[in-house]
Amino acid sequence: MTGPGYCSQCGAELSPGFRFCPGCGAATSGDAPRATIPADADLKPPSPASERALKDFEAQFDALKKRVSTKKSHSILTDPELGGKMRFFMMGCAVLAVAALLGAMLFAIRFLEEVAKRQPG
């Protein structure tokens, strides 16, 4: 690849030398070095445990890729893990603010009543 190209999977722009798409992670046809397997290598089929581990990894990767690609903007209030805690914290702050405001109003009313009692007339 001599100039910028585009991913065949997601259409993201690829710079020369990219081996994987930065948008979706798909392998590209870039100028990536190729590994060679020696002719006398003893190739064995993968074990069932390694196949299961690979499938689990692929499933987790696909779930993460889907979660990242569907999330348009990140907000603490929309995050399912932090949203509840943040809403609880914000409600607590609101309750404290209202209580402080009511306390200040009651203090002001009592203060004005005392001032009115002390003035003649």
Image (cartoon, rainbow, N blue to C red):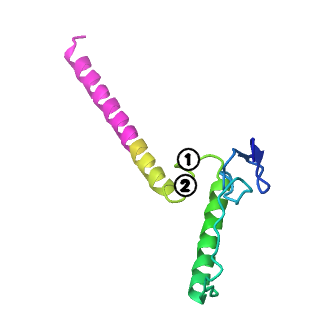
Image vertical order of residue 37 relative to residue 22, above or below:
below
Measured from the top left, where is residue 18 in percent x and y? Answer: 66, 51
Q: Is residue 110 magenta?
A: yes
- Out of 23 and 46, give the one closest to the viewer: 46
Image vertical order of residue 57 relative to residue 76, above or below:
below
Residue at the image position 72 percent from the left and 57 percent from the top: 28
- Out of 46 and 61, give the one closest to the viewer: 46
Could you say whether the residue bearing mark 1 is in a helix, strand or loop? loop
Measured from the top left, where is residue 22 in percent x and y? Answer: 65, 51
Q: Which mark is residue 75?
A: 1
The residue positioned farthest toward the left in the image shown: 118
Instruction: Name the quadrant containing residue 114.
Output: top left
- Out of 21 and 70, give the one closest to the viewer: 21
Residue at the image position 70 percent from the left and 60 percent from the top: 27
Could you say whether the residue bearing mark 2 is in a helix, strand or loop? loop
Residue 120 located left or right of residue 65: left
Residue type at the position of mark 2: Asp
Magenta range is 96-121
The residue that disc 2 covers is 79
Image vertical order of residue 119 relative to residue 17, above or below:
above
Residue at the image position 60 percent from the left and 89 percent from the top: 48
Q: Main secondary structure of the magenta part?
A: helix
The residue positioned farthest toward the right in the image shown: 8
Residue type at the position of mark 1: Ser
Q: Is residue 11 magenta?
A: no
